[in-house]
Image (spheres, rainbow, N blue to C red):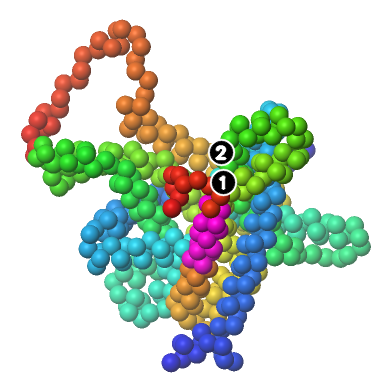
Amino acid sequence: MPDFPFIFDTMGKLLAALPTTLELFILSISVGGVLACFITWARISPYKLLSLPARGYIFVFRGSPLLIQMFLVYYGLGQFAVVRHSIFWPVLREPFVCAVLGLALCTAGYTAEILRGGLIAVPAQQIEAARACGMSGLLLLRRVIAPIAIRQALPAYSTEIILMMKSTALASLVTVWEVTGVAQRIISQTYRAMDVFLCAAAIYLVLNFVLVKLTGGLEYYLTPHLRARPTSLSAGLRPLPPPAAGDASHG
Amino acid sequence: MDQIMLLGFGTKGWGGMLLLGMVMTFLVTFTALAIGAVLGALVAWARLSRSRLARFGGEAYTTVFRGVPELLVIYVVYFGGSTVVTSVGQLLGAEGFIGFPSFIAGALAVGVISGSYQAEVYRGAFQAVARGEIEAARSVGMPTLMRFRRIIAPQVMRFALPGLGNVWQLSLKDSALVSVTGLAELMRTSQVAAGSTRQYFLFYIAGGVLYLVMTSLSNQVFDRAEARVARSFRGGLGRG
């Protein structure tokens, strides 16, 4: 017979730590995503001076454990007087900031490779066609390259963000009390490993389920050409949406 | 240079300890992969089975252990294992708390996780085996076990190799988390060295570099193995 009062109590304590987990997750994938764009840009550049450091970054951050990266940020940086006396110290002293930084640096390496995979999938003909129409630079990126690349990269990216959701657990090792950290504290106090594990596992599984549904929905939204054609006549006769005003010019 | 001395093999050097840590990391990962291979094969078999209950069980296993943080699994195996060991000890007349050996806890936890990934790898590899070959084996009268040993297993191992390489890399990095149980593998040794010399940056960089050495070496081993296995295939996509 499960001990319901204990389970309810545990669930309450774990859910109280859920906002921390979500903050870690959202901040780290946002920062990591921006960083990844720059790394991808450097990685595919024809200049060795840009592509080699990007290659090195990806090799280092994908090849070593996240825990060591996080400890390097949390313990390693504070060792230097230069860092301790810089204006960033009040921020870098915070375990939360270090955890986000460690997570973001790590996911940036993985995400950069995923984005590059997406870019490889953009057919050269489409870029040539867009250039022939006079598009270049950001317009080309926004209208042709990005939509195809993002669509291609999305399945791999959804795996990556689920891994990141799990990785937020490591923040507990630099004293940020998120769900796994709180679970560990309860387990070591009560030694009821299984009950606590089931509660925490349920929370993570729900989070991952939501992520899978969200990215699945986004994928559906981004791939209208792969959906089944409408079969009924009335659906086929719906008028086309009017073109947006801004799209006519090649701004 | 004091710092180089710290990484060296002298009386004050941590070089030997770090190398021992590397060996321990390798051993934990290897044991975990072996445990994961058994679990993974069983789960893959359950997921491919005709019984709905087995399929559900297999799916639940992969969903839970691929979706829950590795650290949480390590905690539950370590603390849960200690509880079990202590109560067994008390039955046998021992007194007080008995800790679960951290090597077994770590290898088991990482093994359970790697099993959930290996299950998917084996399932995919099994589905890549040509149906016709299995039917041909059946038509010449091979019994189930012989069919598995002669036709299915060799091909599944080949198709699974690239996926197993990925799982190995994952497990190698997961094994760093076993350091929370106090097992003196590479991560834990770097931590102890960093703490006792106060040279955090130096030792975490050194630990990171050693992990990179391990991941890139094992990458090469798997590349070689794939090339060797590819000899018996006709050229096709993704090989070369």
Label 1 is found on which chain of the structure? B
**Rounded to the nearest whole Å, what is the CA distance between mark 2 and mark 1?**
7 Å
B226 or A34: which is nearer to us? B226
Callouts 2 and 1 close, C-beta under 8 Å = yes
- Residue most toward the top? A233
Residue under label 1, please give it. B159
Please state if A173 lies on the left or on the right of A80 as rendered: right
Whether labels 2 and 1 share one chain? yes
Residue B188 drawn in magenta: no
Q: Quadrant of residue A112?
A: bottom left
Q: Is residue B34 visible?
A: yes
Which residue appears at 56% of the width and 88% of the height?
B9
Write the start and end of the magenta stretch as one range.
B215-230
Q: Main secondary structure of the magenta part?
A: helix
At label 2, which amino acid type do we have? Ala
Q: Quadrant of residue A60?
A: bottom left
**Rendered location of residue B155, percent (x, y):** 61, 45
Residue under label 2, please give it. B128
Which residue appears at 51% of the width and 67% of the height?
B217
**Rendered location of residue B68, percent (x, y):** 57, 47
B147 or A165: which is nearer to us? B147
Identify the mark nearer the N-term, 2 or 1. 2
Which residue appears at 17% of the width and 41% of the height?
A128
Q: Residues within 10 Å of mark 2 (few under 14, many from 20)?
A: few
